[in-house]
Amino acid sequence: MEKYKDRDIFCCITACNETEEEVALSLNTFKRSSMPSLALRKRVHIFILLDRQRDNIPDAPTLKAYKKLLQIPTQNKDSNFSYAKEHGCRIFHGFIEDIPYSLYIKGDNLISGKRYSILLFSMIVEKVSRLTNHFPRYLLFLDCDTTTRGKYIQRLINTLDIDDNCAGASGYLQIQNLYLNNIIILIQEYCIYFYGHVVEKQYENFFAKSTCLSEAFSLIKYSAFRECLAEFSQIPKNDDLNAISCLEIGEDRYLTTLLISRRYNIRYVPNAIAKTFIPETISSYITQQKRWLQSTLYNQMELLFFHSHSFVKPFKWGLIQWIITFFQFIYCLLNIATISIIISQAQIFNNCLPPICIALGVWLYAVIFSFSVMNSSMKRTYLWIMFNFLVLTFALYYGILGGIIKIIQEEIDNNLISYMTLLLIIFRTLFELYIILKFSHPREWLKLFSGFILYRFFCGLSPLIILYTFANLDNRSWGTRGISDDSQEINQQDPSFWQDLPFFKGNSQWKASQTSVLIGGFSKKLIFMSAFFFVNLLFILFMSNPETQDIGFFICILILSFALLPQCFVSSLYYAGFSFVPLPKKK
C-alpha cells in the first residue's frame, strides 16, 4: 500500500476493444514529455480496467497492446512488476516511468460495460482509502483512446480548487484522427467538437451548469462522487427504459445529472484540451449519435421535471437555462412535424396535392421508416438508411427553396411570421460563420468551412437519427463498444462471486434484471413511439388549419428562437467576460 501514499488524484482509464494505437495514445499522457511537472506526477495513480477479456482464453488484441506498451513480462520475475488476483480480476502493478499503475483485467464473473468498470474502480478506491486511511481528492476520467497533457489536467484541478461548490470540470475535446478527405469526420469536427464546445458548452458554463462531464476527459471531486454512488450503482431491469437510458447508454451524463441535483456547480474549461478518436464511418456515427441522443433526452427530462429545483436554484438566473433546455427538448420532439411542414412547401408537390396531404404523407413515411429499422443491426439496415437519407435530404432542400420563393413572391406584405423565419435562418448562418472566423486559427478555416457546408448538406441525417433512436430505445447492447455477452455461466469456485456488489453477476439486482421480461421494455417503447408520432401528427394538423396557421408558425418561431438564439447570445456574453456564476477569485 506504500505506492498509494500521498497520491490524491486517481485516474480511471476504461478499455474494451481499442487498437494498439489508441492504447498508446492514452498512456503517452503520463510520460514525462507530456507531464513534466514533478509535483503533479507525485499526485497521480493510474487504474486501467480492461473489459471483454474472458478467463482461460488467449489474450485479446487490446490486452496484448497493454502488455507490450507497459512491458509486462510473461513471467513474474521482474521486481518492477507484481501480479495478483482479486475482485474477480487479474491484476498487474507497475510504473509508467515514475507514476504507478494498476491494470485490472476483468474476469468472467464481472458484468461487462463502462459503468460497471467505474463501479469496480470505485470499490477499489474505497478499499485502498480505508486501508491507507488516505482518501483521494480527485478522480480523473480518461478514455482509452484519448490523450492530453499535464498542464491541461492542472487547469482542471485549478478550476476545482478555486470553486469549493464545483463538483466536476471537463475540457475541450479535439479530434485525433482528423482527415480532410473524410466527410463524416469533417461534419463532426464542425457541429460536435467545434460548435458544440465554442457555443453550447460555453452557454452552459455561463450558468455553471454544464450538463455532461464526458468520461473521455473530466475531473470530479471524490467526495461529490461518493454522494452519488448509491444511485449510480443501480442495475436496471430489462423493461425499465428510463434506467437503461440513464445508467447503461449515457452513464457520464447521468452522473452529471446526479451532481447537479445536489446543487453542485459543473464547469467547462475551454483551455484544457484533450484529443480523442471519433467514428470514421456513417454507420458508427449513427450508432454513436443514437446513444448520445437517447441519453440526452432522458437526462433532460430528469433535469426539467424531476430535478428542476436544483437546476434553477440557488441562482434565480437558472430559470433561463431551464426555459432554453425545455424548448430544446420540445424542438427535438417536434422535429418530424417541422420537416413535414417544410417539405410540404415544395412547389412541385403543391401542383398535385394540397400541403396538408404532403405533410401527412411525410409523417406516414417517418412512421414506416421507424418500424422498418426497429431492433435491427446497422449492418442489416445500412443501405436502407442511406437511401432514405438521400431522399429526405433532397425533399428538405426542395421544401426550403419552395418556402423561400413563396415568402418572396406571395407573402411579403401579409405574413410577418414567415419573414421572421427567413431572418432567423440568415442570422443563425451569419453567427456560425462569425464564430468560425473569431474562435479558430486561419489554418483551421478550411476544415471548419468544409464541415459547415457538409453539415447543411447532411441535414436529412438528423431526423433519421431521431427516428432510429425511438425505434431502438430498448436496445441496451449499444451502450459500449460491441455487444456484451453476460449470459455465460458463473464460476462458482470464485469466492468473489458471493459478494453482493453491483458489478458481480451473482448479486441480487443483476439476477432480478436477468429474470425481468423483455416484452415489457418493448411495450414501453411502442408507447413512447406512439406518443411521439401522435404529438407530431397533432402539430401538423394544427399548423395546416387555415385559422390557426399563423399561430402555428409563431409557435415554430418561438421554439426555434428559444432553442438557438439564447445560446448564441449567452455564449457571446461569456466570451465578453460576463457570467451569472463567476469563478471565485483565487485565494
Image (cartoon, rainbow, N blue to C red):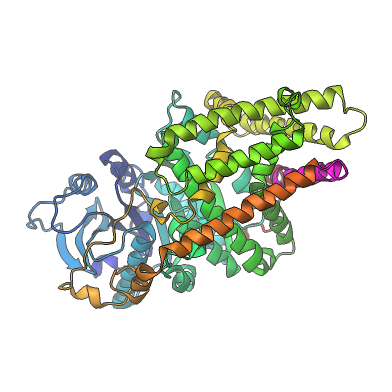
The image shows residue 441 at horizontal and vertical percentages of 56, 29
Q: Nearer the viewer, residue 329 or 353?
A: 353
Which region of the structure is painted magenta?
545-566
Our reading of the magenta stretch's main secondary structure is helix
Q: How many marks?
A: 0
Q: Is residue 166 visible?
A: no
Q: Is residue 271 above or below residue 127?
A: above
Q: Is residue 534 visible?
A: yes
The residue nearer to you, when weighing 578 against 57, is: 57
**Quadrant including the C terminus:** bottom right
Residue 465, position as x, y percentages in the image: 53, 42
- Find the residue positioned furthest to the front: 352
Write the residue at 66% across / 33% down.
432
For residue 94, which quarter of the picture?
A: bottom left
How far across and down, in percent of the image, does residue 377 sit?
39, 44
Residue 43: percent from left, percent from top: 36, 60
Quarter where residue 7 is shown: bottom left
Task: Give the residue at x 48% y 35%.
Answer: 385
Residue 137 shown in magenta? no
> Which residue is rendered at x = 52% and y = 57% of the image?
525
